[in-house]
Amino acid sequence: AQSVTQLGSHVSVSEGALVLLRCNYSSSVPPYLFWYVQYPNQGLQLLLKYTSAATLVKGINGFEAEFKKSETSFHLTKPSAHMSDAAEYFCAVSEDTGNQFYFGTGTSLTVIP
Amino acid sequence: GAGVSQSPSNKVTEKGKDVELRCDPISGHTALYWYRQSLGQGLEFLIYFQGNSAPDKSGLPSDRFSAERTGGSVSTLTIQRTQQEDSAVYLCASSPNQIRNGELFFGEGSRLTVL
Protein backbone atom coordinates (compact mmCIF):
# COMPACT_ATOMS: atom_id res chain seq x y z
CA ALA A 1 0.00 0.00 0.00
CA GLN A 2 1.11 3.51 -0.67
CA SER A 3 0.95 6.54 1.54
CA VAL A 4 2.34 10.02 1.72
CA THR A 5 3.26 12.00 4.80
CA GLN A 6 3.82 15.72 4.70
CA LEU A 7 5.48 17.03 7.84
CA GLY A 8 4.18 20.42 8.87
CA SER A 9 0.72 21.51 7.87
CA HIS A 10 1.85 25.15 8.00
CA VAL A 11 5.22 26.58 7.08
CA SER A 12 6.18 30.26 7.23
CA VAL A 13 9.28 31.72 5.64
CA SER A 14 10.54 35.21 5.06
CA GLU A 15 10.66 36.55 1.53
CA GLY A 16 14.03 35.60 0.06
CA ALA A 17 14.59 32.73 2.47
CA LEU A 18 14.91 29.04 1.63
CA VAL A 19 11.70 27.09 1.22
CA LEU A 20 11.75 23.45 2.39
CA LEU A 21 8.57 21.40 2.34
CA ARG A 22 8.91 17.82 3.49
CA CYS A 23 7.37 14.72 1.96
CA ASN A 24 7.95 11.08 2.87
CA TYR A 25 6.31 8.20 1.10
CA SER A 26 5.81 4.52 1.54
CA SER A 27 5.54 2.25 -1.44
CA SER A 28 6.15 -1.42 -2.06
CA VAL A 29 7.38 -0.75 -5.59
CA PRO A 30 9.36 2.07 -7.18
CA PRO A 31 7.07 5.03 -7.05
CA TYR A 32 6.28 7.99 -9.20
CA LEU A 33 6.25 11.14 -7.12
CA PHE A 34 4.63 14.49 -7.71
CA TRP A 35 4.32 17.91 -6.15
CA TYR A 36 1.21 19.95 -6.86
CA VAL A 37 0.45 23.54 -5.88
CA GLN A 38 -2.96 25.02 -5.18
CA TYR A 39 -3.35 28.78 -5.19
CA PRO A 40 -6.38 30.25 -3.38
CA ASN A 41 -9.68 29.37 -5.04
CA GLN A 42 -7.96 27.46 -7.81
CA GLY A 43 -7.47 23.84 -8.75
CA LEU A 44 -4.23 21.96 -8.31
CA GLN A 45 -1.48 22.32 -10.85
CA LEU A 46 1.66 20.27 -11.31
CA LEU A 47 4.91 21.71 -10.00
CA LEU A 48 7.17 18.78 -10.84
CA LYS A 49 7.31 15.01 -11.03
CA TYR A 50 9.81 12.20 -10.52
CA THR A 51 9.53 9.26 -12.89
CA SER A 52 12.71 7.24 -12.27
CA ALA A 53 15.01 9.33 -14.39
CA ALA A 54 17.19 11.94 -12.67
CA THR A 55 16.80 12.01 -8.90
CA LEU A 56 16.95 15.80 -8.80
CA VAL A 57 13.89 17.17 -10.51
CA LYS A 58 13.40 20.77 -11.51
CA GLY A 59 9.95 22.21 -11.80
CA ILE A 60 8.22 25.48 -12.50
CA ASN A 61 8.74 28.74 -10.62
CA GLY A 62 12.23 27.78 -9.43
CA PHE A 63 11.14 24.79 -7.36
CA GLU A 64 13.02 21.51 -7.29
CA ALA A 65 12.82 18.22 -5.42
CA GLU A 66 15.22 15.37 -4.81
CA PHE A 67 14.21 11.73 -4.70
CA LYS A 68 16.11 9.92 -1.94
CA LYS A 69 15.29 6.24 -1.95
CA SER A 70 17.25 5.49 1.22
CA GLU A 71 15.22 8.08 3.11
CA THR A 72 11.96 7.47 1.20
CA SER A 73 11.74 11.22 0.81
CA PHE A 74 10.89 13.71 -1.90
CA HIS A 75 11.31 17.11 -0.26
CA LEU A 76 10.47 20.27 -2.18
CA THR A 77 12.84 23.22 -2.08
CA LYS A 78 13.28 26.69 -3.51
CA PRO A 79 16.36 28.78 -2.75
CA SER A 80 14.56 32.10 -2.38
CA ALA A 81 10.90 32.49 -1.48
CA HIS A 82 8.72 34.97 -3.30
CA MET A 83 5.44 36.41 -2.11
CA SER A 84 3.69 34.70 -5.00
CA ASP A 85 4.75 31.29 -3.65
CA ALA A 86 2.16 31.52 -0.88
CA ALA A 87 -0.14 28.56 -1.55
CA GLU A 88 -1.03 25.03 -0.51
CA TYR A 89 1.42 22.34 -1.61
CA PHE A 90 0.55 18.68 -2.00
CA CYS A 91 2.87 15.72 -2.41
CA ALA A 92 1.49 12.68 -4.24
CA VAL A 93 2.64 9.16 -5.05
CA SER A 94 1.60 6.81 -7.80
CA GLU A 95 2.80 3.34 -8.64
CA ASP A 96 3.79 1.83 -11.95
CA THR A 97 1.25 -0.94 -11.66
CA GLY A 98 -1.74 1.14 -10.80
CA ASN A 99 -3.58 4.28 -11.65
CA GLN A 100 -4.18 5.49 -8.17
CA PHE A 101 -2.69 8.71 -6.91
CA TYR A 102 -2.28 9.13 -3.16
CA PHE A 103 -2.02 12.64 -1.83
CA GLY A 104 -0.60 14.01 1.37
CA THR A 105 -2.62 16.28 3.61
CA GLY A 106 -0.92 19.36 2.23
CA THR A 107 1.36 22.09 3.56
CA SER A 108 0.25 25.70 3.60
CA LEU A 109 3.14 28.02 2.81
CA THR A 110 3.08 31.60 4.08
CA VAL A 111 5.67 34.07 2.87
CA ILE A 112 6.37 36.96 5.20
CA PRO A 113 7.42 40.27 3.64
CA GLY B 1 -12.05 22.22 -23.88
CA ALA B 2 -8.86 23.86 -22.81
CA GLY B 3 -9.03 22.53 -19.28
CA VAL B 4 -11.08 20.45 -16.89
CA SER B 5 -14.40 22.17 -16.29
CA GLN B 6 -16.53 21.59 -13.21
CA SER B 7 -20.00 22.82 -12.40
CA PRO B 8 -21.46 24.23 -10.33
CA SER B 9 -18.55 26.08 -8.79
CA ASN B 10 -20.59 26.60 -5.63
CA LYS B 11 -23.61 24.73 -4.37
CA VAL B 12 -25.53 25.35 -1.17
CA THR B 13 -28.16 22.79 -0.33
CA GLU B 14 -30.29 21.68 2.56
CA LYS B 15 -29.66 18.50 4.46
CA GLY B 16 -31.47 15.59 2.85
CA LYS B 17 -31.50 16.97 -0.67
CA ASP B 18 -29.75 15.31 -3.60
CA VAL B 19 -27.00 17.08 -5.53
CA GLU B 20 -25.27 16.45 -8.83
CA LEU B 21 -21.79 17.66 -9.61
CA ARG B 22 -20.53 17.67 -13.17
CA CYS B 23 -17.04 17.27 -14.59
CA ASP B 24 -16.08 17.85 -18.20
CA PRO B 25 -12.53 16.54 -18.71
CA ILE B 26 -9.97 17.64 -21.20
CA SER B 27 -10.88 16.34 -24.64
CA GLY B 28 -9.24 12.99 -25.35
CA HIS B 29 -8.41 12.21 -21.73
CA THR B 30 -9.57 8.69 -20.99
CA ALA B 31 -8.89 8.63 -17.25
CA LEU B 32 -11.03 10.65 -14.86
CA TYR B 33 -10.76 10.97 -11.09
CA TRP B 34 -12.95 12.42 -8.35
CA TYR B 35 -11.44 13.63 -5.10
CA ARG B 36 -12.91 15.33 -2.05
CA GLN B 37 -11.01 18.06 -0.28
CA SER B 38 -12.03 18.92 3.25
CA LEU B 39 -10.36 21.50 5.43
CA GLY B 40 -7.17 20.03 6.83
CA GLN B 41 -7.84 16.62 5.32
CA GLY B 42 -5.90 16.69 2.10
CA LEU B 43 -7.36 15.04 -0.97
CA GLU B 44 -9.56 12.03 -0.39
CA PHE B 45 -9.86 9.69 -3.37
CA LEU B 46 -13.44 8.88 -4.31
CA ILE B 47 -13.55 7.10 -7.65
CA TYR B 48 -11.59 6.57 -10.83
CA PHE B 49 -12.86 6.00 -14.38
CA GLN B 50 -11.02 4.52 -17.32
CA GLY B 51 -13.28 5.29 -20.25
CA ASN B 52 -16.82 4.66 -19.03
CA SER B 53 -15.93 1.96 -16.54
CA ALA B 54 -14.94 2.48 -12.94
CA PRO B 55 -12.20 0.00 -11.99
CA ASP B 56 -11.84 1.56 -8.58
CA LYS B 57 -14.83 2.73 -6.54
CA SER B 58 -13.17 2.02 -3.24
CA GLY B 59 -13.15 5.59 -2.07
CA LEU B 60 -16.86 6.31 -2.20
CA PRO B 61 -17.76 7.07 1.45
CA SER B 62 -21.19 5.47 1.45
CA ASP B 63 -23.95 4.18 -0.80
CA ARG B 64 -25.32 7.71 -0.94
CA PHE B 65 -22.48 8.51 -3.31
CA SER B 66 -22.49 7.38 -6.93
CA ALA B 67 -20.83 8.44 -10.13
CA GLU B 68 -21.16 7.72 -13.78
CA ARG B 69 -19.39 8.63 -16.96
CA THR B 70 -20.95 8.54 -20.36
CA GLY B 71 -19.36 8.60 -23.78
CA GLY B 72 -15.95 8.46 -22.21
CA SER B 73 -16.26 12.14 -21.46
CA VAL B 74 -18.49 13.95 -18.98
CA SER B 75 -18.85 12.53 -15.50
CA THR B 76 -21.48 13.19 -12.87
CA LEU B 77 -21.01 12.67 -9.15
CA THR B 78 -24.32 12.31 -7.33
CA ILE B 79 -24.79 12.60 -3.59
CA GLN B 80 -28.18 11.50 -2.32
CA ARG B 81 -29.75 12.63 0.95
CA THR B 82 -26.89 15.01 1.66
CA GLN B 83 -25.51 15.31 5.17
CA GLN B 84 -23.56 18.17 6.74
CA GLU B 85 -20.40 16.08 6.72
CA ASP B 86 -20.61 16.00 2.92
CA SER B 87 -19.66 19.68 2.86
CA ALA B 88 -16.34 19.93 1.03
CA VAL B 89 -14.74 20.86 -2.26
CA TYR B 90 -15.15 18.14 -4.84
CA LEU B 91 -12.29 18.05 -7.31
CA CYS B 92 -12.23 16.34 -10.66
CA ALA B 93 -9.07 15.51 -12.56
CA SER B 94 -8.37 13.90 -15.90
CA SER B 95 -5.36 12.24 -17.45
CA PRO B 96 -4.52 11.39 -21.06
CA ASN B 97 -4.56 7.61 -20.75
CA GLN B 98 -3.95 4.71 -18.45
CA ILE B 99 -0.58 6.13 -17.76
CA ARG B 100 2.14 5.17 -15.43
CA ASN B 101 3.92 8.38 -14.90
CA GLY B 102 1.72 11.10 -16.18
CA GLU B 103 0.11 13.88 -14.31
CA LEU B 104 -3.42 14.71 -13.33
CA PHE B 105 -5.06 17.85 -14.68
CA PHE B 106 -7.45 19.31 -12.14
CA GLY B 107 -10.55 21.41 -12.41
CA GLU B 108 -11.20 24.26 -10.00
CA GLY B 109 -13.62 22.22 -7.96
CA SER B 110 -17.22 22.37 -6.85
CA ARG B 111 -17.69 23.72 -3.34
CA LEU B 112 -20.61 22.01 -1.64
CA THR B 113 -22.17 23.40 1.50
CA VAL B 114 -24.88 21.39 3.23
CA LEU B 115 -26.91 23.40 5.71
Image (cartoon, helix red, strand yellow):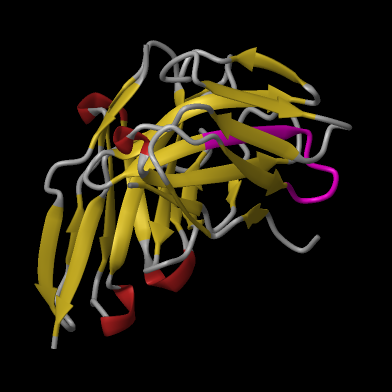
Q: Quadrant of residue A81?
A: bottom left
Q: Quadrant of residue B42?
A: top left
The residue under the point 60% across, 56% down is B8
Horizontal and vertical percent for residue A21?
A: 21, 53
Quarter of the image where the C terminus of chain A is located: bottom left
The residue under the point 63% across, 39% down is B102
Does the magenta segment cover residue A96?
no
Residue closer to the observer: B7 or A85: B7
Q: Quadrant of residue A10?
A: bottom left
Residue B103 seen: no
Compared to A82, does A23 lie above or below? above
The secondary structure that dominates the magenta segment is loop
Q: Which residues are magenta?
A: B25-34
Q: Is residue B24 left or right of residue B9?
A: right
Residue closer to the observer: A30 or B23: B23
The residue under the point 51% across, 33% down is A52
Q: Is residue B9 left or right of residue B12?
A: right
The residue under the point 76% across, 63% down is B2
Residue B74 seen: yes
Horizontal and vertical percent for residue A82?
A: 27, 81
